[in-house]
C-alpha cells in the first residue's frame, strides 16, 4: 500500500505544482503586478506542502501499524490462550499467527490461530487502504490550503527555502541520532561482554575460540576470547589490499591526470570506476574459482605451500576491488591543483616528473589521503571476500600464504544462530565492533591532521 501512497502523493504534488504556477501567473497578468517570486517557486511551495506532511504521516503510520494490529489480534484471541503468558510467549504466538497468515503452515494449526490469522489479514488490508485514504486526504487538504495563499505578493521563494532548511536540519538530526544510537549500543553491549570477560584477556589474549555451550545439555568448550589473532588477520589482509591498491590506484591517477590524452581519459576512467560497482560476492567467486587455484599452482611450481584459503588471495582481490576509490579521488585531487603551480614549476626548469613529485602530489595530498582512507575503511570492513577466500579460523600468523580471518567475518559468525544476547559468544561481536569503530575513528583523526597540515601550506 505504501506504493499507492507514493503514487497518489506524486500525482497530487504535480497537480499542485501546475496549479500554483498557473494561479500566480494568471493573477499577476490580471492585476498587472509583477510576482515577488518566480512562478516555479509558487508551484514548488504548493507541491511541498501537498507531499511532505502526508509522506511523514505514512512513515509514522507504517511504524505503528504492525504493533497496533498485533495488540488487536492478541486481544481477539480466547482468554485461555493469553492469560498469564509472558512477553516472549506473546511474541511467539504473534509469529505463529503471522506465519499462518503468510501461508507458512506446518501441520494442523489451532482453529483459534487460523481465525486470528484471517483477522490479521483483513485488518492489515483495511489498515493499508485507510493509510492510502488518509494520506490522500491530507495531501488534498494541503493543496486547498496552500492554493489560497498563492498571490503575486506572496514570498514563495522564502517559504520554499524555509521548508528545505527544516528538511536539511531534520536529516542532520536523524544522522546524528543514528550515530549516537550506534555508539551507545556498542558501548552498552561491549560493557556487558567485559563484565564476563576481562578486557586484558580480550585485547592481549592469543587464543580466539568463542565456541561455548548454548544449552545446558550441549557439550562445548569454555571459550577463549583473545582477539589478537583476529586483529592480526585483519591487519594482514588490509596491508596486502592496500599494497595492491595504493600503487596501482595512485599511478593510474597520475597517468590519467598528467599523461593521458583527453579521449583516452574519457574512455578509461569510467571503465576503471566500474570495478567499484561489481558486487563483492562476485569478487569472492573470482578469488575462489580463479585466483586461488592460480596461486596454488604458481606456489607449487616454485616450491611454496599455498593454502586453499590464503590471506594473499583475499587481500589481492580486495586490493583490486578498492583501486577505484584511490584512483578516482586522487585523479580529482590532482586535476584540482591550480594550473599556476604547474606553470611556476615548469618556469623554474623542473621536468614533468619533478613537478609531479615535488608540487602536484604534496598539493593534492589532502584528496589523496581521503581516497586512501576511504579505501582502507572499505578494506577493513569487507566481509564476503574474506569469508569465501580467506577462511573463518583465527590464526596467530602473518604468513600471507596461510588462512586467516578478520574482525568483520567474526562479527557475522558470532551473530549467526539462535544464541541469546546474554551469552559471551554473542556479546563478543559488539566488543569487536567497538574496537573496529575506535580504529576507524583514529584513522579519520590522523587523516584530518594530515589534511589540515598540507592545506595550511598550499591553500
Image: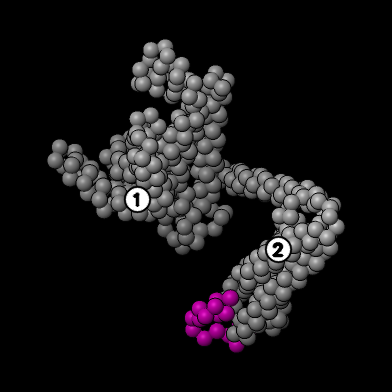
Gap between marks 1 and 2, in whole Å? 48 Å
- Viewer-nearest of discs 1 and 2: 2
How far from the left and from the top, in percent, is residue 152? 82, 54
Whole-percent x, y for residue 35 in the image = 80, 52
Mark 1 surroundings within 10 Å by alpha-carbon count, few (fewer than 14), some (14 through 19), many (20 or more): many
At numbered mark 1, what does the secondary structure look like: helix, strand or loop? helix
Q: 104 or 458: nearer the eye?
A: 458
Residue 239: horizontal and vertical position, in percent? 38, 34
What span is in magenta?
98-113
Task: Tell me which label, 1 or 2, sits earlier in the chain.
Answer: 2
Q: Does the magenta stretch include residue 293?
A: no
Quadrant of image for the C terminus:
top right
Identify the secondary structure beneath mark 2.
helix
Question: Which residue sits at x=21%, y=46%?
Answer: 294
Q: Residue furthest top?
A: 348
Q: In this view, does 396 lie above or below 97?
A: above
Q: Name the residue under label 2.
A: 18
Give the residue drawn at x 39%, y 51%. 278
Residue 282: where, in percent of width, then height?
Answer: 35, 54
Name above or below for residue 296 compared with residue 220.
above
Which quarter of the figure is the N terminus placed in? bottom right
Looking at the rendering, which quadrant does residue 144 occupy?
A: bottom right
- Give the residue number, with chain letter if any, for mark 1: 283
Task: Give the left or right position of residue 346, taking residue 150 as reference.
Answer: left
User: Which residue is at 52% across, 37% downward?
Assistant: 440
Residue placed most toward the observer, 99 or 172: 172
Foreground: 2 or 157?
157
Q: From what the image shows, is residue 115 above or below residue 320? A: below
Amino acid at each position: 500500500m505504501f506504493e499507492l501512497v507514493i503514487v497518489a502523493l506524486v500525482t497530487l504534488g504535480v497537480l499542485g505544482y501546475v496549479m500554483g504556477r498557473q494561479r500566480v501567473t494568471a493573477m499577476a497578468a490580471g492585476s498587472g503586478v509583477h510576482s515577488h517570486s518566480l512562478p516555479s517557486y509558487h508551484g514548488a511551495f504548493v507541491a511541498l506542502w501537498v507531499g511532505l506532511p502526508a509522506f511523514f504521516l505514512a512513515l509514522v503510520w507504517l511504524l505503528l501499524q504492525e504493533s497496533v494490529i498485533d495488540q488487536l489480534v492478541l486481544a481477539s484471541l480466547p482468554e485461555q490462550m493469553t492469560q498469564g503468558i509472558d512477553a516472549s510467549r506473546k511474541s511467539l504466538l504473534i509469529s505463529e499467527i503471522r506465519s499462518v497468515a503468510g501461508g507458512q503452515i506446518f501441520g494442523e494449526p489451532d482453529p483459534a490461530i487460523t481465525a486470528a490469522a484471517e483477522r490479521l489479514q483483513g485488518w492489515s488490508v483495511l489498515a493499508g487502504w485507510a493509510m492510502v485514504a488518509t494520506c490522500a486526504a491530507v495531501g488534498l487538504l494541503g493543496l486547498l490550503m496552500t492554493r489560497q495563499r498563492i498571490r503575486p505578493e506572496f514570498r514563495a521563494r522564502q517559504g520554499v527555502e524555509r521548508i528545505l532548511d527544516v528538511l536539511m536540519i531534520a536529516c542532520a538530526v536523524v544522522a546524528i541520532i543514528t550515530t549516537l544510537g550506534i555508539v551507545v549500543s556498542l558501548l552498552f553491549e561491549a560493557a556487558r561482554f567485559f563484565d564476563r570477560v576481562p578486557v586484558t584477556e580480550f585485547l592481549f589474549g592469543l587464543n580466539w575460540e568463542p565456541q561455548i555451550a548454548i544449552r545446558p545439555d550441549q557439550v562445548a568448550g569454555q571459550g577463549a576470547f583473545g582477539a589478537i589473532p583476529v586483529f592480526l588477520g585483519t591487519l594482514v589482509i588490509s596491508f596486502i589490499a592496500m599494497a595492491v591498491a595504493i600503487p596501482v590506484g595512485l599511478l593510474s591517477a597520475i597517468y590519467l591526470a598528467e599523461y593521458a590524452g583527453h579521449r583516452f581519459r574519457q574512455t578509461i576512467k569510467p571503465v576503471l570506476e566500474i570495478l567499484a560497482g561489481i558486487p563483492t560476492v562476485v569478487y569472492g567467486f573470482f578469488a575462489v574459482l580463479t585466483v586461488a587455484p592460480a596461486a596454488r599452482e604458481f606456489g607449487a611450481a616454485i616450491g611454496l605451500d599455498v593454502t586453499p584459503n590464503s590471506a594473499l588471495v583475499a587481500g589481492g582481490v580486495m586490493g583490486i576491488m578498492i583501486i577505484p576509490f584511490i584512483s578516482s579521488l586522487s585523479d580529482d585531487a590532482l586535476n584540482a591543483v591550480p594550473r599556476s603551480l604547474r606553470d611556476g614549476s615548469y618556469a623554474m626548469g623542473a621536468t614533468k616528473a619533478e613537478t609531479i613529485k615535488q608540487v602536484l602530489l604534496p598539493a593534492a595530498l589532502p584528496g589523496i589521503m581521503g581516497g586512501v582512507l576511504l579505501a582502507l575503511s572499505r578494506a577493513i570492513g569487507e566481509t564476503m571476500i574474506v569469508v569465501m577466500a580467506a577462511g573463518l579460523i583465527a590464526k596467530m600468523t602473518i604468513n600471507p600464504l596461510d588462512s586467516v580471518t578478520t574482525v568483520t567475518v567474526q562479527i557475522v559468525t558470532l551473530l549467526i544462530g539462535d544464541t541469546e544476547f546474554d551469552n559471551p559468544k554473542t556479546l563478543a561481536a559488539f566488543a569487536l565492533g567497538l574496537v573496529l569503530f575506535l580504529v576507524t575513528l583514529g584513522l579519520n583523526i590522523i587523516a584530518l591532521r594530515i589534511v589540515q597540515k598540507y592545506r595550511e601550506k598550499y591553500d
